[in-house]
Image (tube, helix red, strand yellow):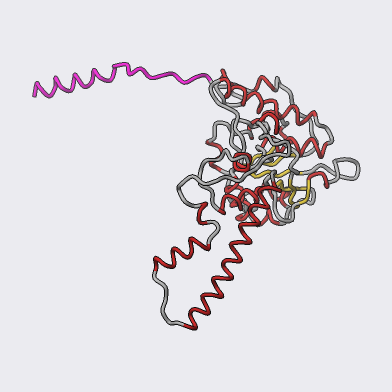
Amino acid sequence: MEDEETELSLLADLVHIEIGRREKRPHCNRCCRPVAVCWCQSLDKQIVETSCRVVILQHPHEEKRCLRTAPMLQAALPNGAYMQVKGKRFSLTRYPQLTDILTSENSILMYPGEDAMSLEELPPVGKNQPPYNIIIIDGTWQQAKSMFHNCHQLHSLKQVRLTGKYTSEYVIRTQPTEDALSTVETAAIALATLEQNWSIYDVLVQPLQLLCQYQMNHGAVPHQSKEYMIVSGLYKKPLGKRTYKKLRKCGAKQGDTLSEFMDTLVNEYENHEEENDDSGHSAHDSSPAEPSREDAQEENEENDPFCHLDKESEVSQLDYTPSDGKLMSYDEIR
């Protein structure tokens, strides 16, 4: 009994032992970033006056990203010009606050669909054009595509795309294509174009520029887009036809070189399929015997132009050289 009491007393003393917990760094109340790397100073209490309203439909997983850019819009825009809703399916019964926005004729969806029109084709805000509701889906490309597919109310909105003349300031992140932009950049370009005031863009992207500068000061390096690495031969991972198709869906900026290469492979692939179908029917009619699994595999490897792109071994990259014969550096393409 005494031994048990002694053991319990020793265990109780362990509670008071300091375990050396590290105190958390103080965080900014405005941007929720550590004070040492806070980007609020770039705004310096500036509020962008705009008649249009930015509506962010944010995927729940996006909130966990420490380098997300939507808070920059929330900090720079007034309350009436910014609205953020989190979710995956935005039904009007669950989100009644979106009813007026999703049913308004002045609402536009920044989404590069097949029927999307260019941003420059929209009439700017003025006497004959009321302010727009600029709806932006905040998430990865796959998340945005899934959210658009699952929300039928978004299908009836006017889809708007950005032209490929803009280059992202988000240099610490690998973008899929040369003209892929972050959430804050998409909103900044849309507001500046529709309001005909490019000082809006300059103010909104200042936090993003400072964020990238902080990260590079602590070891981050500028990233080139996946598209640029592919066409310049810098991408070392095996490539398949899905990679090229995905880049083309995203709107690859090096479209001439990438599209020609992809079209060649697709045409060859379709021609081989037609030849295989014809030869398969004739062989089936002439002989009831079927080829073995090994023979079929060897035949598929010979006829499939994409086969070599899916192997684990290093593959030859797309040969892309500018007209002057020199590959462009990251600073040159910007």
Q: Is residue 314 left or right of residue 5?
A: right
Residue 280 against residue 98 in the figure, above or below = below
Q: Which residue is most to the right?
A: 127
Q: Residue at x 44, y 63 (%)?
A: 298
On whether residue 9 falls in the magenta region, the answer is: yes
Image quadrant occupied by the N terminus: top left
- Residue 149 location in percent, x, y? 62, 55
Residue 202 falls in image quadrant: top right
On whether residue 224 falls in the magenta region, the answer is: no
Of residues 108 and 217, which is closer to you in this image?
A: 217
Residue 55 falls in image quadrant: top right
- Residue 162 location in percent, x, y? 74, 44
- Residue 117 location in percent, x, y? 78, 51
Q: Is residue 247 left or right of residue 46?
A: left
Residue 272 falls in image quadrant: bottom right
Q: Which residue is most to the front?
A: 325
Q: Is residue 43 left or right of residue 66?
A: right
- Residue 270 location in percent, x, y? 60, 65
Residue interval drawn in magenta: 1-26
Q: Residue at x 78, y 39 (%)?
A: 52
Residue 248 against residue 323 in the figure, above or below = below
Q: Residue at x 71, y 21 (%)?
A: 45
Image quadrant occupied by the C terminus: top right
